[in-house]
């Protein structure tokens, strides 16, 4: 019985990741509640560093653009220097983990709402998924 529950949990996680998102509620941080979610991407499109910080532009997968009826194919998120330094434009990753601040402003961190209303101002890339070819 315990083995079946474990297998069912793994399958559920895989299905959720395959659907483009997996949200996990975190405890309240100093700036309030946050949610971590995984976004499927096609690749890292661009890098930008300026006085405001470090930014990565990611190219979205075609199925996300179609399913979410988006009018754009790339979106830029702020990130930390450690993540920024690991990537180059053109690198292919399975996805990125986003930290969403103020999740109540985007239906409790629903990645569809984040993308549909382009609320990338509430998000930050905190880690990278598996790199292709590794």
Image (tube, helix red, strand yellow):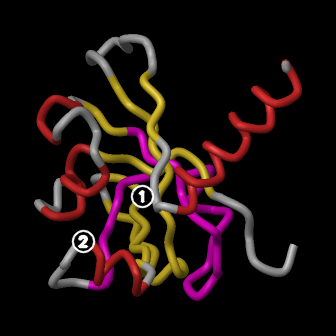
Which numbered disc flags the more N-terminal residue, 2 or 1? 1
Determine the secondary structure under disc 1.
strand
Does the segment drawn in magenta span residue 88? yes
Left or right of 62? Residue 1 is right
Determine the secondary structure under disc 2.
loop
Q: Which mark is residue 68?
A: 2
The residue located at (19%, 78%) in the rendering is: 70
The residue located at (42%, 58%) in the rendering is: 54
For residue 29, above or below residue 114: above
Left or right of 3? Residue 108 is left
Question: Percent x, y for residue 16?
Answer: 53, 50
Using the image as rendered, state which of residue 33 and residue 121 is in the foreground.
Answer: 33
Range of magenta residues: 73-99
Question: Percent x, y for residue 122?
Answer: 23, 44
Question: Which residue in the rendered view is the most extreme toward the front?
Answer: 1
For residue 46, above or below residue 17: below
- The residue identified by callout 1 is 54
The image shows a total of numbered marks equal to 2
The residue located at (24%, 71%) in the rendering is: 68
Marks 2 and 1 sit apart, C-alpha to C-alpha, by 27 Å
Q: Nearer the viewer, mark 2 or mark 1?
A: 2
């Amino acid at each position: 019985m315990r083995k079946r529950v474990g297998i069912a949990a793994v399958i559920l996680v895989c299905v959720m990741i395959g659907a483009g998102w997996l949200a996990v509620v975190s405890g309240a941080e100093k700036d309030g509640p946050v949610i971590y979610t995984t976004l499927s991407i096609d690749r890292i499109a661009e890098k930008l560093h300026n006085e405001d910080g470090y930014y990565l532009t990611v190219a979205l997968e075609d199925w996300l653009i179609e399913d979410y009826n988006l009018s754009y194919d790339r979106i830029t998120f702020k990130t930390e220097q450690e993540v920024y330094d690991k990537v180059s434009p053109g690198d292919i990753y399975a996805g990125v983990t986003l930290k969403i601040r103020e999740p109540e402003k985007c239906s409790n961190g629903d990645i569809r709402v984040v993308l549909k209303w382009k609320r990338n101002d509430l998000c930050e890339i905190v880690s990278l998924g598996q790199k292709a070819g590794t």
